[in-house]
């Protein structure tokens, strides 16, 4: 095989092509590849951070929900206690009102009984005076006296 000028020209052209590629094409190409690798790495790191932030946010949401449920249960319990207090207060007030009305009725009954006694005493005294008057008008006779007393007793 003979080395001729064509082969030598092709070798020189190939060497110039390699030098040109190494000097002007390869560095921007490697820079683009490295930038792409760096962007991919940053994207993966951002995705990992986002997943961690999402997990933390989810934990925080769960904690807030637990706290809200506990607060709601506490409010419901307080409402039940307040309702029981209101019912108990209403019972006490009803009992007090019943006792007050009973005392009022008892005092009315007592007053009515006192009026009835006074009326009865007045009627008894009128009857006694009337009986005494009748006895004095008649002559003093034991039979008539007994009859008037029996009559007076029947009226009372």
Image (cartoon, rainbow, N blue to C red):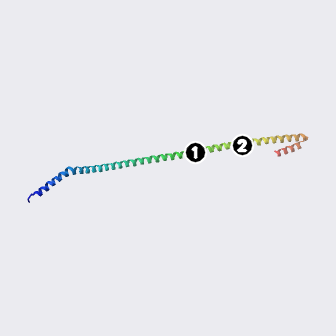
Foreground of the two, 38 or 5: 5
Whether the residues at callouts 2 and 1 have beta carbons within 8 Å, the answer is no
Specify the label residue 37 is tagged with: none
Report the residue at 16% width, 52% height from top.
16
Closer to viewer: mark 2 or mark 1: 1
Q: Is residue 117 left or right of residue 48?
A: right
Q: Position of residue 83 (x, y in %)?
A: 56, 46
Q: Which residue is mark 2?
A: 108
Image quadrant containing the N terminus: bottom left
> Marks 2 and 1, Cα distance to the nearest angstrom?
32 Å
Q: What secondary structure is found at the residue carrying circle 2?
A: helix
Q: Is residue 25 left or right of residue 126?
A: left
Q: Is residue 11 left or right of residue 142?
A: left
Q: Position of residue 119 (x, y in %)?
A: 79, 42
Image quadrant containing the C terminus: top right
Question: Farthest bottom residue?
Answer: 1
Q: Which residue is mark 1?
A: 86
Q: Position of residue 120 (x, y in %)?
A: 79, 42
Foreground of the two, 155 or 48: 48
Report the residue at 33% width, 48% height from top.
46
């Amino acid at each position: 095989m003979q080395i001729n000028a064509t082969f030598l020209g092709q070798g020189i052209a190939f060497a110039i092509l390699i030098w040109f590629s190494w000097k002007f094409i390869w560095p921007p190409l490697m820079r683009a590849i490295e930038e792409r690798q760096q962007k991919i790495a940053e994207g993966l790191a951002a995705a990992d951070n986002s997943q961690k932030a999402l997990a933390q946010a989810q934990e925080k949401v769960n904690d807030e929900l637990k706290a809200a449920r506990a607060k709601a249960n506490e409010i419901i319990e307080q409402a039940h206690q307040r309702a029981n207090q209101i019912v108990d207060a209403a019972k006490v007030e009803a009992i007090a009102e019943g006792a007050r009305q009973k005392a009022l009725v008892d005092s009315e009954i007592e007053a009515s009984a006192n009026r009835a006694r006074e009326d009865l005493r007045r009627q008894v005294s009128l009857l006694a005076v009337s009986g005494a008057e009748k006895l004095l008008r008649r002559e003093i006779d034991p039979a008539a006296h007994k009859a008037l007393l029996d009559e007076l007793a029947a009226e009372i």
